[in-house]
Image: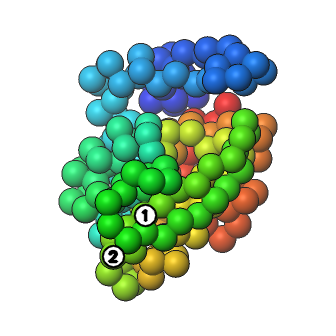
Amino acid sequence: MSDLTAKILGRIRDVPDYPSPGIVFKDITPLLGDHVTFAAVVDALADELDVDTVVGIEARGFILAAPVAYQAGAGFVPVRKKGKLPAAVLEESYDLEYGSAVIEVHRDAFAPGERVLIVDDVLATGGTARAAVDLVGRAGAEVVAVSVLMELGFLKGRDRLTGVDVRSLVVV
């Protein structure tokens, strides 16, 4: 186990039965409060990728994606829950481990052919990430990779992202 992996795992708190019974929520707030580990995570998520824009998926993806965009010298685009963006949008519905939802992005968020990195905190069933990949593609940009802090390997979300470079800092 690498030093970064150990630091990350040591700063993620399991919260049982949240947001619903049977779900074990991975709370990253202890990690965010540790400047050294948070900075190392941002550096690792931004490492070795040439991108024009970083997409952050609401809500915890924003926390990671904005500093990754800064570190990568790229712009930042939020992918939001339905009804939160003020201009014309593209939308995509998806299923997640405890329900379903819709995410949106502004229709004019990307230039044609723009190279995009999608960042989120957790890859679980892959529904949110797949929806974000589809939105970026429909908007005319190219997804270079999906990078996540943590992948819940037992949920096999990576399987929904065939053909996409998926990068996880830790797999649990």
Quadrant holding the C terminus: top right
Foreground: 122 or 91?
Answer: 91
Q: Residue at x 38, y 71 (%)?
A: 88
Q: Residue at x 47, y 24 (%)?
A: 28
Q: Residue at x 43, y 69 (%)?
A: 89
Quadrant holding the N terminus: top right
Q: Residue 7: tell me if it is visible.
A: no
Say which element carries label 1: strand
Q: Is residue 143 above or below residue 158?
A: below
Q: Amino acid at mark 2?
A: Asp
Q: Residue at x 32, y 19 (%)?
A: 34
Look at the numbered discs 2 and 1 and tell me whether their residues touch, using CB distance below 8 Å.
no
Q: Residue 156: image x %, image y %?
A: 76, 47
Q: Residue 103: image x %, image y %?
A: 53, 56
The circle on residue 105 is: 1
Say which element carries label 2: loop
Foreground: 56 or 48?
Answer: 56
Q: Residue 85: tell me if it is visible.
A: yes
Q: How many marks?
A: 2
Q: CA distance from mark 2 to mark 1?
A: 8 Å
Mark 2 Cα shell of 10 Å, populated few (<14), some (14-19), many (≥20): few
Relative to 123, 40 lies left or right: left
Q: Quadrant of residue 85?
A: bottom left
Mark 1 Cα shell of 10 Å, populated few (<14), some (14-19), many (≥20): many
The circle on residue 2 is: none
Q: Residue 130: image x %, image y %?
A: 63, 60
Outermost residue to the bottom:
112
The circle on residue 108 is: 2
